[in-house]
Amino acid sequence: MSQDILSTETNRRQLQQIIAGLSDGVIVLDPDQSILWANDAALAMHGVEHVSDLGANARAYTKRFALRYRNNHVVPVDSYPINRVARGETFSDVLVELTCAQDQEQRNWVHRVRSLVLADSRGEPESLVLIMDDVTDWASAEHRFEKTFSANPAPAVICRLSDLRYIKVNPGFLEMTGFTRDQVIGTSTYELDVLEQAENKELAKQRLREGATIPQMQAELRMADGSGKQVIVAGQPLELHDQPCMLFSFVDMEPRHKAEVALRQSEERFAKAFRLSPVPILLCGAGDQVVLDVNEAFLDTLGYPSEQVLGESIAQIDFFDDKNARTRLFSALEKIGSLDRIDVRVRKKDSELIDCAVSADTVNIQEKPCYLLVLMDITERKRTELELVSAIEEVMKDASWFSRTLIEKLANVKSVNSPRLPSVSFTDLTARERDVLGLICEGLADKEIAARLKLAPNTVRNHVATVYSKLDVHSRSEAIVWARERGLFAGAWRNKGQR
């Protein structure tokens, strides 16, 4: 054996001993493309145990292992790193995804590969070396980031800090701005400046230069059509492909801005309608019934100054003539949420009484439930009705045969025009009060009722007053209508009709 050959073999053994324990994978080929040796790290990166499992040469290797680029395109056989180094090429940082054809589970590895050509003393290639890093974990993490970044509905872009050019953009940003991917990727932050209209632009620019976190701040982002959109922008530094980058994320404030404008316009319309309405309107809290606001018509109609109404509870103002009616009104409102044209009697500041039809509904003011009460003055209508009833009663004194038809007509009118609050039923009256009501329906006067029931006239008057209060009526004719509406004292009606 010649001295040169002996020296070469010695050098190879020494080189193999040095690199055997390295974490980098190393495969050594002969210039004739045969695979001479591989360290344990290289074998593990291919999922094999012996050098022979890699194949006898570069051609056999390409049949045993399938390679793809990171974009999932198949690596042509001529471009396999082992074939490139076999041709004497030197290269670095080639990323390939490798699958072993013999692995039934189809496990994948990701290698970052570089080549090394060792020459002899004459400059001829003596050994061809492939050096590879197992970057599978890094690639897997990057893949998860890529999927998360693309799937994130929040608009986002990533710029490289070394040259401030955008290297990634997600669909959310493209959809929000109207830009295409090609219009963003590779563009400088000077051309597409996402911080140009930021409320604290100087701080944001300084943080970008320093590669530090950019706090959330309002900004106006330029759209593809030249218009602007209100957003919240923030920046977060990160490492991507071993390069320092800045992740810009955005919150589209346009829907919120439109909702705020619509809400403000709605509130303005409500306020104008509230103020300008000629009908008295009152707004109070649902829980405590404290008056929050009233319109001018309310103050003018009831004669109160605003300082004696605002901030006071309805009970303290005490403008409902009948406390029981007030209690029933708000109890009904609490149960069903709204009321339509309920007859109540209201006391003005000067103690004058007026009849009102109250309509009410539940509204939310600044997320607080409130009651909106609309009071329609029906005093004139009530007066006309009472005058009509009085006239009918006067006629009935001499034409009792006419009474049943008139009372039925009057009952129909009352039921259509005057909705009432839920009130007491007939069973809520005492036995004596029922007797008194029945005799009223027969058309008897107080003295006649006293004689029939053998009671003192004052006692009868007290019973009649109690019946009026419980039924929320104000005259004998209204009491008769109340009973007729409920089909009470049918015998009394028949007897009255036969008089």
Image (tube, rainbow, N blue to C red):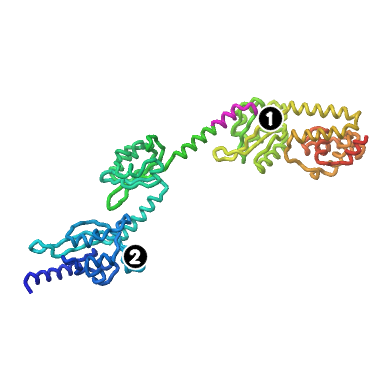
Quadrant location of the C terminus in the rendered image: top right
Q: Which numbered disc, 1 or 2, marks the residue that appears first in the sequence? A: 2
The x and y percentages for residue 159 are 31, 45
Rendered residue at 81%/27% (across/down): 388
Rendered residue at 27%/60% (across/down): 111
How busy is the neighbourhood of tag 2: few (under 14 within 10 Å), some, or many (20 plus)?
A: few
Dividing the picture into quarters, in which one does residue 46 lie? bottom left
Quadrant location of the N terminus in the rendered image: bottom left
Q: Residue furthest bottom?
A: 1
The x and y percentages for residue 450 are 90, 37
Rendered residue at 74%/26% (across/down): 380
Residue 276 falls inside the magenta stretch: yes
Residue 113, placed above or below residue 414: below
Residue 167, placed above or below residue 320: below
The x and y percentages for residue 430 are 82, 44
Query: Which disc, if any, is residue 107?
Result: 2
- For numbered disc 2, what is the local secondary structure? loop
Toward the viewer: 32 or 132? Answer: 32
304 with respect to 216 (left or right): right
Toward the viewer: 236 or 60? Answer: 60
Residue 170 seen from this side? yes
Give the residue type that dot 1 points to: Met
Query: According to the image, label 1 marks what residue?
Result: 376
Dividing the picture into quarters, in which one does residue 390 lie? top right
Query: Which disc, if any, is residue 484?
Result: none
Residue 463 falls inside the magenta stretch: no
Residue 400, placed above or below residue 77: above
Residue 478, placed above or below residue 241: above
The x and y percentages for residue 133 are 25, 61
Q: Nearer the viewer, mark 1 or mark 2?
A: 2
The rendered magenta stretch, by its main secondary structure, is classed as helix
